[in-house]
Amino acid sequence: MSNDDLTHENFDFRGFDVPDLKAVTLASSSDGDQSKQPKTKHEDASKNRKHGKKKSKSDARSKKRAGAGKTSESFDDYEDYEEREAVSKADKKVSKDRPGLFAPMTLREVTVRNRIWLPPMCTYSSFARDGRPTPFHYQHYVSRAFGGFGMVIVESTAVAPEGRITPCDLGLWEDGQIDAWRWIVDGIREAGAVPAIQLNHAGRKASTGCFAVGYDSQSVPEEAGGWPTMAPSEIAFGGLRTPRALSVDEIHGLVGAFAVAAGRAVAAGFQAIQIHAAHGYLISQFLDPLSNERDDEYGGDLTGRSRFLVEVVDAVRGAVPEGVPVLVRISATDWAAGGWDLDQTIALSKVLKEHGVDVMDVSTGGIMSGVSIPVKPNYQVPFSEQVKAKADIPVTAVGLITKPKQAAKILAHGEADAVEIGRAALRDPYWPLRAANKLGIPSTEIPYAPQYVAGAY
């Protein structure tokens, strides 16, 4: 199994036991060995005809369409027609006030053009190791803005150099990095998307390797550019180096680091800030009792363990203009007995809403190595649905969402307010434009850039 199969967005599944992963369709039908993909209804129908079996109702519908003048050029394939038909029926069953994929969404003073967002996905491509983005990052993010995504959330960006996941992570820990971001932010905005940025500190999962450095899934030695790590408690993650415990004064300093980095992000032109409190990084380490054994005000019960995040939210909220949305990415469960879970996530989300958080980006996992995660399409969506319903706060859903019909159903069923397309967006920067076509939405109603209208689906 390749490393590509074991990574999803900026959560690394390497080191986890995922026994059912091979049985799951991780990509669209155009990805990988077609012989191993589940058969579509069209393929099943073809097989039945070949063996002389009775024609199905779907065969009859197909024949009726052909007789009515519908050619193969009218639909990409039979699955596309089924997708449009199913979504059309689903739309009739839901309330009229439930938004579709291409409905705008307003957060404070920012209006996002649709509900299809690009989640933060680490690319580990600041090769100079100075935290500054490069032409690669411009191409990567601006192309997806032209591709129709509503919000483009830039990958994990460190608030301190020792908070980088790898030496090649992006950063906003000093004023000199602001100008390097402006042309990328301007490009995203000019293409019609809302530029957002994820601020992070990796804690005990910092100073690890990547494709550009080596030491994959290991701590990078100091002689190779690594550094000592820090965490709430002296508890290592898997085989990584053991961190030192942060002092209270250092925690206060990191709260300030998040706030100052948020101010720099706004100065660079970002229109929304996301605080990374998921996937086993520093804030997540404070939240989870499996990684936080402190006996001071930053440990113990839920109030103590969530204190660091609440203080970061307050500091960031105070450092950015009132009209700038603040998002928090959370792991709704760490899939480990005695650890962080959905009930604590819901309770915390209620508190964060009171402190000015506008959206909860609901993911899962990352605090422990060696746990089993039931990876399959939509496997994280039930968590976003529960947070939305019980904390009464807007949420985004993520987790192997790869197909237009799949994404549309999540919104139609009220399971989230927006969907984040990660893995599929790496394959197809123009996923939203293609999705609109597959769902039967006219090209005039979707965000084509003028330069690309001639090539509209």
Image (tube, rainbow, N blue to C red):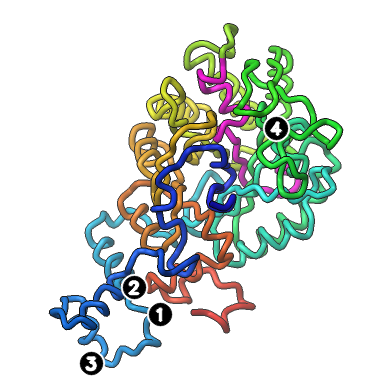
Name the kind of residue labelled 1 in the image: Asp
Q: Residue 65 at what x, y percent from top left?
A: 25, 86
Q: SS at mark 4?
A: loop
| Mark 3–mark 1 distance (CA, rounded to whole Å) | 17 Å
Q: SS at mark 1?
A: loop
- Front-most of residues 430 and 354: 430
Name the kind of residue labelled 2 in the image: Glu
Q: Residue 201 at what x, y percent from top left?
A: 68, 32
Q: Are marks 4 and 3 in contact (CB under 8 Å)?
A: no
Residue at x-position 77% and y-position 45%: 213
| Mark 4–mark 2 distance (CA, rounded to whole Å) | 44 Å
Q: Which residues are magenta?
A: 265-292
Badge 1: how crowded within 10 Å, few (<14), some, or many (20+)? few
Residue under pointer 1: 76
Residue under pointer 4: 206
Q: Are marks 1 and 2 in contact (CB under 8 Å)?
A: yes
Residue 342 to residue 435: above or below:
above
Residue under pointer 3: 67
Q: Are marks 3 and 1 in contact (CB under 8 Å)?
A: no
Residue under pointer 2: 79
